[in-house]
Amino acid sequence: MARIGIPRALFYYDYFPLWQAFFTALGHQVVVSDATNKGILEDGIKRAVDETCLPVKLYMGHVQNLRGRVDYLFIPRLVSLEEKHFSCPKFIGLPDMVRGSVPNLPPILDVTVDVTDNKKLTRSSLLELGKLLGASQGQLGEAYQAGLQAHRSYRARLKQGLTHAEAIRGSTPAKTAATDYLLRVALLSHPYNICDSWVSNNLIGKLQKMGADVTTADALSLGYLRQKANSLSDQIFWTFEKKLAGAAMHYLETREVDGIILVMAFECGPDSLVTELIEREVRDRLPVMTLCMDEHTGEAGIVTRLEAFVDMIVRQKSRQEAAAAKEWAQA
Ligand code: SF4
């Protein structure tokens, strides 16, 4: 039995249940790095090159946190997850960046997932990886099915409105009445920007405390989000950013939320373009705000901006409700 290390950062929030079920079914032990803390972030900042975005710096810190505790590190190279769409270049070069930044690491399992190339589908990549670990054909088939099943139920829990952390823990959705909230907000970002409560300064918790019901793009199905994003005049070729644009288009059309908060990492090329595109589409029709985070972002600044945004929406809603009541009384 080998100990397989998985850093609690980047695509951990998208695929951890799949990977965990796959490796566990093959009889291996999955070891996840500790929850982010000051030491992990400082280690990451020390290791990564200055120009890198905060999520990649943080990833280096999580890799360092696993050093000496595992036999292998699992760092897949996510090139393309849907045909003719690509991941950010940092995802594509991640195993190489890790090798170049953190010394004395155990062997890295760095299978490539490249759907556009069409030879390296997710399934064959995982099977190739299992073979490397000495699994038989029969074991591989069963482990792949276990991974797939875990991923499907994870996605289903996200669609029920659980946060990523809750869905990974396997929690059941809380039954809070919609009327218990003052407002509903869509928090659109990569899961790694908003689900790591240390790095995001507990953004979701803060909004909830201010009376907001918070939803994310992962509450909607991926196929639907892609289709919505295609209605934009500018086509997006980054898979994750396309998902965010699709969610913005959905909320603009359905008005299921009272406002949209976009969260991006400073130094992120893809997000700076797509965030601007989304803001342009949304700004005259729905309240929208962009938060840009880096390692220097202070909690006080975030709270002030969130409070102002929430306050503005709540006032707007009460004005609209008062106008509707007046109209009704005069009818
Ligand atoms: S998408 Fe942006 S934030 Fe994410 S890894 Fe790439 S550059 Fe960093």
Image (tube, rainbow, N blue to C red):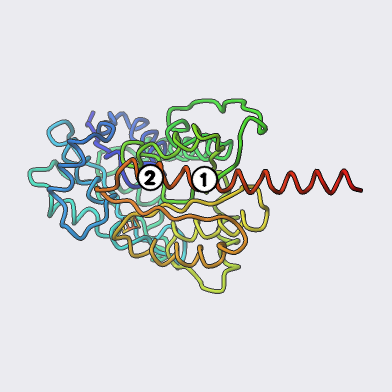
Crowd class of label 1 (few under 14; some 14 to 19; many from 20; radius 10 Å): many
Q: Nearer the viewer, residue 194 or 128?
A: 194
Dot placed on the residue nearer the N-terminal end, 2 or 1: 1
Q: Nearer the viewer, mark 2 or mark 1?
A: 2
Residue shown at 19% from the left, 56% from the top: 96
Side (left or right) of 123 relative to 182? left
Side (left or right) of 144 relative to 160? left
What kind of element bears circle 2? helix
Q: Nearer the viewer, residue 301 or 81?
A: 301
Q: Nearer the viewer, residue 26 or 294?
A: 294
Q: Nearer the viewer, residue 76 or 325?
A: 325
How far from the left and from the top, in percent, is residue 90? Answer: 28, 59
Quadrant of the snapshot with the N terminus = top left
What kind of element bears circle 1? loop
Picture quadrant of residue 42: top left
Amino acid type for the residue under numbered disc 1:
Thr
Residue shown at 45% from the left, 59% from the top: 241
Crowd class of label 2 (few under 14; some 14 to 19; many from 20; radius 10 Å): some
Side (left or right) of 230 relative to 105? right
Residue of label 1: 216
How far from the left and from the top, in percent, is residue 292? Answer: 36, 54
Ligand 1 is located in which of the four quadrants?
bottom left
Residue of label 2: 302
Query: Which residue occupies the extreme left position in the image?
Result: 104
